Amino acid sequence: MKNGTSLISKRDRKFFKTFFGVMLAAFLISTLHSQYNPFELLLKSDALWSFLWEDFIPPVVNNPLAVVSAIAVTLSLAVVSTFIAMTLSFFTAVYASTRTAPKPRIAKYVRAIVTVMRNIPALIWAYILFSALGIGTGVALVALIISSFAFLTRAFVEVIDELPESALEPLSACGCTFWQKVFHCVLPNCIPDFLEWLLYCVELNIRSSTIVGMVGGGGIGLVLFTFIKSFNYHAAAGIILIIAFMVIAVEWIMNCIRRKVSASYKIIFSAWGALCVASLFVIDADWGKLLSRIPRIAVSLGRLIIFDFDRFPATLAAFGESVAMTVLATIYSAILGLLFGALMSRLVVRNRLINILIAAAISFVRAVPSVIWVLLVLVCIGFGPATGIVGLGFHSLAFFAKAFAQSFDDIGSGVVEALKATGANRLQIFFTGILPAVLSSVVAWFSLRFEVNFADSTVLGMVGAGGIGFVISANIQNYKYGRAGVAIFLVILFAYGVEMFFSRIKKKYLMNE
Amino acid sequence: MTQEKYVLVVRNLKKTYGNGVQALKDVSFNVKKGEFIAVLGSSGSGKSTLIRTINQLIPVTSGQIFVAGNEIQTLKGRDLRRARRRIGMIFQHYNLVDRLSVMQNVLHGTLGGMSTLYSVLGRYPEERKQAVLELLDDFSLRDYAYKRAGELSGGQKQRVGIARALMQNPEILLCDEPISSLDPITAGAIMDLLSVMAYKNDIACIVNLHQVNFARQYASRIIGIAHGEVVYDGPAGTIGHRDLERIYGKQIPLAGNMLYSTGEAI
Ligand SMILES: Nc1ncnc2c1ncn2[C@@H]1O[C@H](COP(=O)(O)OP(=O)(O)O)[C@@H](O)[C@H]1O
Ligand SMILES: [Mg+2]
């Protein structure tokens, strides 16, 4: 394209240069930094297979009753935390949205605080809280409430921001009070979108509560972690299958609710509320003690803010490790995700059997939380940068495959037919027609997953893999809150920077003028 | 058989879909070089099926289709793709890649003649690119060459669709309701462009239409289809009320009421 007539506009060329330039640079730097060679894994794959084959298969479930009660705890955590966070988020969101906020200046501060909170992963919250309140299921619940609160508040604010002025005007004109406006106009208008986010949040929290459980929250995660630590891999494999089944079942139920949702919001929320009350009995916690200790959270957070730059170079190196892991895991998995997404999509590969087999394998991989994959890779190939990259990449690959397959299918058969009619072959159709048609959504999924992978990479250290998570957890355990605070600050800063980069790219190049 | 005279020969064509619907029941006709044929028929009569079997987007159940002497329904893989290059296709919904530039969309017409690697890398030969620019000039789309196809109006999109098909240097153009999504004035302009380009390059055109008046105005010959059978095949000028009744039943879409309809309105 350098020589001769150009094919695309200057704006598009700039996009390709910026986006792929930054990605290529990030890729090269990360590869040099982590010394990661993807082919090494292929060389080791024999050992990996035999390990999986002999140590994990067949999976066994020893004590079904204990497993059922552990699952009940994990599900309860997700259900209750989302419900409580939803209530808090709703009242915060009406204060934080520019559409409704009675005091716009306060709204700005609220949004800033939520942004900071949102960029701290659930597992880091869990660590901070465990150090302040002691371990236990009740504390895990608080950690999940905080992280879902931040997630939902931002989502709700975006939904309310998109309300048209015309929806609010009639009520303002007739002199309604703020709360009348909120309950008679904002809530009814936004509730379908709110519910969409809530269901998504429940799905996220099922995985998060499993992970938070591993480090002391209880539930199925703790059961799994115990088996792995005691080298009881057959039992661990059994639990992993059960977790996958649990997540798939929950996603299936959420999809049913999504489809059936018409005007039955009252029923959904009442049922949910009742379920929460029941769940509170399952979550075995000393509620009085928990509530009395809540003020200690403020003390812990206060200690984190008193930064301590001792050993900063080591922190920085660990941070670099996490970033490199994120970059490589995301890029490799996105490329492979395109391949698997294509194999899953009926539009690209017209073979029902291949479509279905790949889709089934992908949904299994997706159902198991990524931190668990990292743990498995850790026990298979030991420490090293490859562990985090392969572990994160595995789950992320499944995520991309599903998202991309959906995007491929969404473009419909029109373009494919048109290119087929010109005499183009399958590869030409895929690369010159289908791929460009989904470019915007590929970039959107990529940015979304990059943020998720970074959050995951920061927690890997806590379960024994490297990176900034190790610095955070080790320092909190040794009461060096100031050092942990610096590390958490780095995490927030980077996450925020990445978010800015992608949202600018999207605004500048991908939206229509 | 005397196929040299004809660019397209269709013999005893039958198509039964997997669900048992007999979309085409024994259709036969010949198309001369440069002929402009309108295919009329109500919705569901089998027009799209007919057009899509000609370039084998849909496999036939039985019968023969000769494109410039080749029996296209027997071809596979590379040979089929080579045969398709001689047949351009134009769609009701344009079927462009909205995100790509007009230039890239028109160049898609040349994919059939290119190596896979070069086309994936976007390395189209310079003379093809120049040819596209000239064509866009003729279509008064030169200023839009670097716009995204998604940003154009319906009429402009259809012109890009026509340009893409012409880049194939086809001998036959298949057009499946090319104007059904357009307002009547734009529709007329598109039909003008289509007939001029077909005449200039001696391309045989088969156009599915919903508007009898457009068929009379532009086509030299009309093929009428009802329930998968050819019920009229003759000159466009002399088609009468009786013939139209055989094609459409009682509700004939004549100029007045059909002029403003879009889509599959009948
Ligand atoms: N992919 C398909 N599978 C099954 N039946 C089809 C399919 N496409 C079209 N048909 C049926 O074949 C008949 C002819 O359809 P079509 O060729 O699209 O008609 P037209 O283009 O004239 O409206 C209709 O009865 C339609 O329902
Ligand atoms: Mg049709």
Image: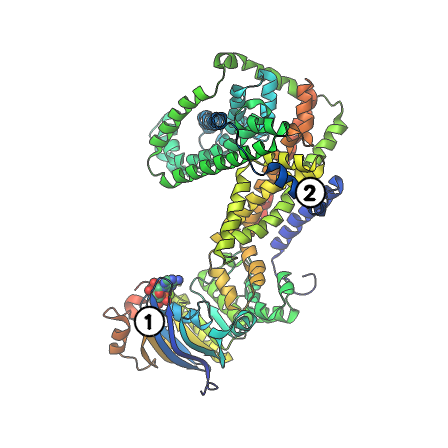
Where, by quadrant of the figure, is residue A484 drawn?
A: top right
Q: Is residue A6 left or right of residue A343?
A: right
The coloring applied to the image is rainbow
Q: Quadrant of the N terminus of chain B?
A: bottom left
Callout in the foreground (2, 1): 2
Q: Residues within 10 Å of mark 2 (few under 14, many from 20)?
A: some
The vertical placement of A242 against B16, above or below, is: above
Instruction: Give residue A232's quadrant in the image.
Output: top right
Q: Which mark is residue A413?
A: none
Identify which residue, B214 or A448, lies in the foreground.
Answer: A448
Q: Which residue is mark 1?
A: B228
Using the rendered image of the protein, determine whether residue A181 is visible from the camera's viewpoint.
no
Instruction: Check mark 1 vs ligand 1: CB closer than 8 Å? yes or no.
Output: yes
Determine whether B233 is above or below A478 in the image.
Answer: below
Disc 2 and disc 1: Cα gap in Å?
A: 62 Å
Q: Is residue A188 visible?
A: yes
Do the residues bearing badges 2 and 1 touch, measured as CB atoms within 8 Å? no
Which secondary structure lies at badge 1?
A: loop
Q: Position of residue A60 (x, y in %)?
A: 54, 33
- Tell me the amino acid under the disc marked 1: Gly
Dot 2 and dot 1 within a common chain: no
Chain identity of mark 2: A
Instruction: Find out if the beta carbon at label 2 lies less than 8 Å from the nearest ligand 1 atom.
Output: no
Q: Which mark is residue A47?
A: 2
User: Are there few (<14), some (14-19), or many (20+) residues within 10 Å of tag 1?
Assistant: many
Label 2 sits on a secondary structure element that is: helix
Tell me which amino acid carries mark 2. Ala
x, y (%) of residue A149? Answer: 50, 27
Exactly how many numbered labels are in the figure? 2
Of B258 and B46, nearer the camera is B46
Query: The residue marked by circle 1 belongs to what chain?
Result: B
